[in-house]
Amino acid sequence: NNCSSQCEACVPGTYASSACDCCSIPGHCPKPPAHSAFDTLCVPCSAGTFCREAGCPSCLPCPPGSSTTEQRGQNCTPCEAGFYKPFLGPGACGPCSQGSYTLLKGSTECIVCPAGFYCLCTHCGPLPCPDDAVCPVGSIHPTSCHKPLFVKHGYSCYISDSAIGIIIGVCISVIIVAGFLSARCYYFRQKHQSQNPTEISSLVAESRRDPVYTGL
């Protein structure tokens, strides 16, 4: 086979295309003539695929947890901490959502921050929740339970009995004060009317005693 004697292995990051079928050795392509405009008939690996060694018959997809965004990839780069890639092949590593994290490179999934802990960032480990706060699943920061108005029960804050008592007491006090002010206003109004009956009667009598001439 004249082709076989002129074949050469495709370099890493490339693979042998169907144009190289005349070469009997997998991953090899005919060496172009010296006057050819093409350096080789080998095809570059596309983004998301790679070939580490010379003579690849095809490029392999990047495994989950790694990616490459350039052509002629010889290796796939593991996802950084705080990023993940759950699928095989092309595609970039994506960031973990808030309230989840991953500490390792090459992660295929993110871990949700567990209850009783909080996660400040997607590449930070979980931090214990303070004693006076609550941290439900997926917490980014602790939620404080301010005593004595609130009490901690499990992973939630609830209004305390003392706070309920204070609210009820304030409401009752407002009602009492409003009632007292209303009664006081009514008392002074009645007192004012009872102190001036003579003046009112004299005005009425005077108006009746002096008739007004209206003409014929």
Image: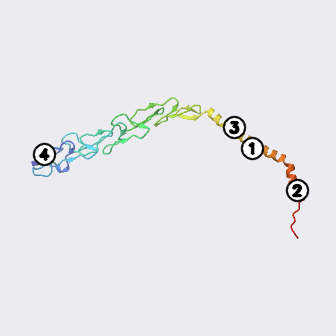
Q: Earlier in the sequence, mark 4 or mark 2?
A: 4
Residue at numbered disc 2: 206
Q: Amino acid at mark 2?
A: Glu
Amino acid type, callout 1 = Ser
Cα gap from disc 4 to disc 3, whole angstroms: 99 Å
* Closest to the observer, 53 or 99: 99
SS at circle 2: helix
- Residue found at the far bottom of this picture: 216
**What numbered label is drawn on residue 169?**
none
Looking at the image, which is closer to me, 20 or 201?
201
Task: Label 3, secondary structure: give it.
Answer: helix
* Residue closer to the observer: 167 or 205: 205
Whole-percent x and y of residue 169? 67, 36
Mark sitting earlier along the chain (3/2): 3
Foreground tag (3 vs 2):
2
Mark 3 highlights which residue?
173
Q: Measuring 54% from the left and 35% from the top, which residue is drawn there?
A: 156
User: Which of disc 2 and disc 1 is earlier in sequence?
Assistant: 1
Q: Mark 4 vs mark 3: which is more N-terminal? A: 4
- Give the residue type that dot 3 points to: Ser
Q: Is residue 189 left or right of residue 12?
A: right
